[in-house]
Image (cartoon, rainbow, N blue to C red):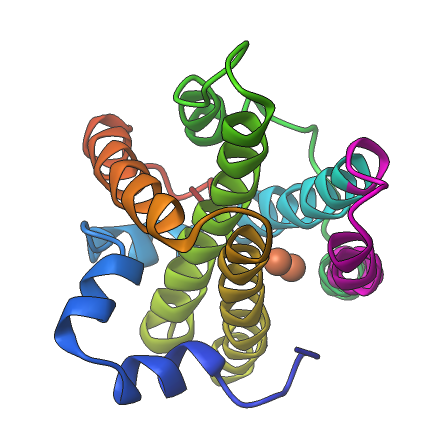
Amino acid sequence: MLIGSISYLCLIMENISEDTRNILGLQLPTDPRWVDLAGMSLEDILSDHAYCEQKAATSCISLIQRYSSKAELVNALAPIVTEEWGHFRLVLAELQKRGLHLARQRRDEYVNQLLLFQKKGGHPEETFLDQLLTMALIEARSCERFKRLSEGLEDEYMKNFYRRFMESEAGHYTLFISLAGTYVDKEKVRKRWKEWLDHESSVMQNLELRGDRIH
Ligand SMILES: [Fe+2]
Ligand SMILES: [Fe+2]
């Protein structure tokens, strides 16, 4: 799942049944106007992107700390931490190359609204599952947004820049779902993933369309 690897997302999308696609797939495509807005505020979008990568790395570290007894999870997420931090550095370098600055971190409305949907205080397995599915969903939506940028931006260099991120995040989202299935009954995972997709769709519908945000 290194950057530059073939797009696992596209591969599975081509080879799976319609039913499975609906299970994995986001329900609401990004408003096409978003790419135009994002293209207009490169410093903001790159800064926000950098923080998304930083948070992805931090979240994987937290999962490793919290679930240290789950060897498969620890082994799978340890290299993702390195990869996500590598992404942060790539985005930072891109900002600096352009004479732009890393802006202040903003409130992450999208993630905050997803977190509200997590079951807390119930069975530990439910909490664990929701944590993995939240990660999967953020990766999936990021992947979708990077895909939009890679197709819709005018600058060829930036299109390619985002295509590489899209490929990488596609591998991550499938990894979190498959990790969930390693520890939790697959039917439970499938059912809860569907609920998450419904929730995510309503969050997206109500979020303000802003070009200075990845989500
Ligand atoms: Fe990343
Ligand atoms: Fe990722």
Q: Position of residue 69 (x, y in %)?
A: 84, 42
Q: Quadrant of residue 59?
A: top right
Q: Position of residue 182 (x, y in %)?
A: 58, 57
Left or right: where does residue 89 sit relative to residue 212? right
Q: Does 172 appear in magenta?
A: no
Question: Of helix, strand and loop, which mostly describes the magenta segment?
Answer: helix
Q: Residue at the spot x=56%, y=55% of the render?
A: 176
Residue at the extreme front: 185
Left or right: where does residue 26 sit relative to residue 212? left
Q: Residue at the spot x=68%, y=49% of the render?
A: 50
Q: Position of residue 49 (x, y in %)?
A: 60, 49
* Ligand 1 quadrant in view: bottom right
Q: Residue at the spot x=74%, y=39% of the render?
A: 63
Number of numbered discs on residues: 0
What range is drawn magenta here? 64-89
Q: Nearer the viewer, residue 4 or 90?
A: 4
Q: Nearer the viewer, residue 71 or 172?
A: 71
Q: Residue at the spot x=76%, y=47% of the render?
A: 57
Q: Position of residue 158 (x, y in %)?
A: 53, 74
User: Is residue 155 visible to the viewer in this orientation of the structure?
Assistant: no
Q: Quadrant of residue 209?
A: top left
